[in-house]
Structures are given as structure tokens and as C-alpha cells.
Image: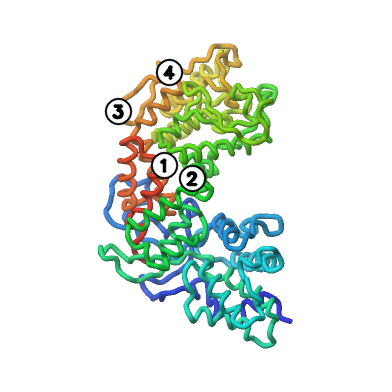
Amino acid sequence: MRTLRQLSYIGTTTFLASLTFLAGCTGEIASGEDEVTGGGNTTGGSGSGSTGSGGTDEPDNGPPEVCIPGIPMTTQIPRLLNRQYDNTVRDLLGVTTVDSKLPSEQLVDDFDGPMTPDAWRLYQEVAEKIAKAVMAGPNKSKFISCDPSAAGCLEQTIKTFGRKAFRRPLTDLEVARFQKLGQITPAGTPAEVAEATLVGFLVSPSFIMLPELATDQDASGQGIKLSSYEVATKLSYLLWGSAPDEVLSAAADNNELQTKEQILAQAQRMIAVREKTGPLVTSFHRNWAQMNNGNAHWWKMDHDTETYPLYSDAAKPSWQAELDSFFEDVAFEGGSFDDLLLSNVAFVNKDNAAIYGLDPASYGTELTKVELDANVRPGFLTRVGFLSSYAGYDATSPILRGAFISVYLLGVNPGPPIPGATMQTVQGDFATQRARIEKLTEPATCNGCHSIINPPGFVMEGFDGIGKLQTTDPLGGAIDASVTTNTIDFGDGNVKEISSPLQLMQEITQLKKAKQLYAEAWVSYAFGRDPNGKDKCVVDQIDTKLSEGGYSILNLLADLTQADSFRVRVRETP
């Protein structure tokens, strides 16, 4: 008896061919400009669209400063990101776990470049487990709803499920290839053939990858016009991280995703479905806030429970969940970039209530939406998750907090440390942590950078090492959270005196550089590629709207789908 895998891969050269050349996809892969050398995608972006180098018009020396009209060159076949793989098998087949884990936890991590033997082997193994679970469980009808031994059952299943899995109708040749699984000798049972057919879909390049193989030129002459099926896929994996639903698929079948207006109508419909778009919003803001940056300090710091009796290492997941809920709530309540820094909404449970000055007995494990004092707790930087992550073991860290704000929000580059400069311990009788840090960073070898980094951190000294309000420093002195002798350079040539976190946040919301960085982060994340001169044009358009005020995050998300590069691609040269 042949094994399931043997059944699935008989006739490999005619059925699946190879991942490199996308057997099972419509269109032809020609030599030269359109030659495909792999299915890589950038791990920093959504993986929803084409990915690549971000174009060749920018040197690798930081984000571009000037808009260069045109469309970035992109690869044609990015792979599904692991989170997209999970969402897709969940939505198509109802499978959420394999061996008590997310399916993607048994794959390799997201990676760039061509498919590797180990990665390919794991896709096969996970596909077999998924198919077995589907065929033996309550979700069988999501794949096949008829008796596989009945005439025409498998053919109809191949066509209907294939339309969902490949995100387009199958060609007659593809249908015939899948039907060959039931024509081998010795024959498998109808149930075995059905299961092998499902495995075949799950290991097909047309499922694992998001190909863009249309060849018609766009009327504008800018590049190749994506088909409605390709646009539907791009929309769905950007906004929902999963395969298109029936409404979007019907629009693609009717070729109704060719104009900006058609795309916008579908985008707005999809964005309004909070349970599906919410994960995108939280995922992006984790990326923007550097939570996905392995060199950042998020969630890495433990704290002394004698100094901070309200601290518990076990509470970190709920603190992260609070920030996820905060970002999602700001977006879906019509909030803008400003609200990320000014909203007084918080999500409270027993783990953070006392830190916020609330009665923990009034809360359970679930997060409850509350409003804090808007003058004291504006925005995500005053939430427990940030303040506890950017602090020391038993003290605050103005340096860590200030560096985060300076670099990622103000967009100020303090420059590299002076060669040979090291920060030493400092002796003395200090009444505050601020005074200790000022003395520590006083030497000329330190002050050049720290005169920029420290001040925003000093403004946050009214919060202790886990985010609780403090008016007296643990060292005994009164907290001074104003920046008077040291000033903050907002990068516009103006220096301003700041006396509170609220004033600091208000100033950041008025800073053009902060909004540019936010717009740039969205464009890079949504399009799945590094910042480049051609995407800078889209960044500038969004930045202009951000600067006008009242421009909601969800409106921004819809506008991303209106970029020319969302429906037109330019070939990436080898």
C-alpha cells in the first residue's frame, strides 16, 4: 500500500513540478526579466503584496528623503507568512492546531530567499497532518461535502475547493492533474484519494505562495496590471491576513477589482469588519512601536519585587494584551495618530489595576476598558507595558525611555557613541535618579549623545520602574519631571521646555517628523518592502493628510489600497 505522501506526489514532474517554477499557476514564466528565482518575502512587512528590494533607485543608507515617481520593482511570488498560513487553514478548513500547536509553529520561521529542503519537508509534514485531521473530523465538509466514491464528486471538490485554496479558478489542466491522483495503479480507496488531494492542494506552490503572474500592461504604461484575482488576494492578505471571502471572490470573478474606486469599496467593507482587521492593526502597531525588534527592550526586564511589590513577571502577557487592545480601540473608535499619544483609554485587569491607582478587587483576569486621567496618562507611552519595559531592575531608566522617544518618535539621530567612551558607575549622595543620571552622563564623551537622549526620559520620571505614579523618588528627593535646564530638540530648529508627559505628547503630535515616520512605517509594513524612493511618494501623500488633522487610522489603511503600486507591478530584474 502506498503511503499518503506517495499518493500525493506521483507524477511530480507534471503535477507539482517545482516550487521555483510555480506549477499549477496561470500565466507563463519566461526567461529574462520575468525569470523567478525564489519565493522570498520580507519578514518585516505584511507579506500581502509583492516584496523585494524596494527598488534599485536608493542606496542602502537609510530611508529616502525624496519622492521618485514610479512603481517599485517587486518579486512575483512572495510566500505566505506563517501567521497568514495559520489564518488561511483556519478559514478554509477550520483547523487551528496541529499536535496541540499552531500549524505554523511546526514550520520554519519566516525567511527570505528560495525554498529550502528543510522548509519544504515541514510544509509536507504539516499538510499531511492537516489533511488527516480534516478528513477524520467535523470539518470534513469544508473540503468535501459529497461521497468521494460517487461519480463526479472529486472533480467538483477539486474545482470548488481549488477556487478557494488557489484564490482563482483552476485551469482545465490543473483539474486534470489533480484527478490523476485517483487514476494510479494500484488504486487508493476513495477516502485515501480525497485525503491525498487535500494534501496536494496544501503543498501546491499556488497555495503556499501569492503569485502575481498577469502579463497585461496597465493603460497608464507604468507596468503590468494585476488581475482582479491578484488584487483580491492582495487586499485580503493585507487587511485580513487570510484568503478572500465570498464577496471579494465574487468581485474578482466579475473582474470588478480593476479601478481604484472598485478596490476602495471592497477595502472599506473589509476594514469595517473589526474582528478580521483588528489583528492587522495590532500587528502593525507592535511593529511600529518596536515590539518586534529583537534589540528593543520590550518585555525583557524583570523587576525587584521588594522595590516594586506590585510587579509580577507572570503579568507581562496581560500588559502586552493591554497595548494590543489600546491600539485596536484607538483605530476602531475613529482615532488618529494623535490619539495614539493622547488617548486616556486603558484596559485594566487585576494585574495592572493597582499600578494605575485602581482597586484590583474590582477587576478579574479579563481586560476592562476604562478612562484614566487624561492629564496624567496620555497615550501608549504612559501605559504599564512601555514604562515597565523601559526601566531598570530596581529603578527607572531615563536613558532607555528617552532613547526610545528620541529615536523612534522624534526621529532624532544622536549619532554613534564616541569611540572608547564607556559609561562608568558614579559615586555620590543623590536624592533622585535624575540627578544620578545627569552626573553619570556629564563627561564630554557622554554628553554629546545624552544631551539629546536624556531629556524626554526625565519628563517620564513621574512614573516609577513599573509605571506607577510617583511624586517622591525612592532615593528620597522630590520628582522633577520638567525639562528646563536641558531642552528637547524637536528636529525643527526649535528647542522647547517641557514640564509634563502630556505636554511632551502634545508636542510630538505636532511634529512633522513623527508623522512621517508613522506613515513610512505603514507603507513599508503594508507593502512588505523596505522604504524606497518610489514608495516615498505614497508616504508623502499620507503624511500630508496626517498633518491636516482628523485623519483616522482606518482612513489611512483604506488609502494604502489606492496607491498605483497596489494594482500595478514592475518586473524585478535578476
Q: Are marks 4 and 3 in contact (CB under 8 Å)?
A: no
Which of the two discs, 1 and 4, sits closer to the camera? Answer: 1
Please tell me which of labels 4 and 3 falls first in the chain.
3
Quarter of the image that includes the C terminus: bottom left
According to the image, label 2 marks what residue? 281
Which mark sits nearer the N-terminus, 3 or 1?
3
For label 4, the residue is 499
Q: Which mark is residue 284?
A: none
Q: CA distance from mark 2 to mark 1?
A: 9 Å
The residue positioned 39% from the left and 49% from the top of the image is: 558
SS label for mark 3: loop
Residue picked out by circle 3: 493
The answer to whether residue 390 is visible is: no
As drawn, is 101 to the left or to the right of 476? right
Q: Which of labels 4 and 3 is toward the front?
A: 4
Q: Regarding mark 1 in the picture, which secondary structure is present there?
A: helix
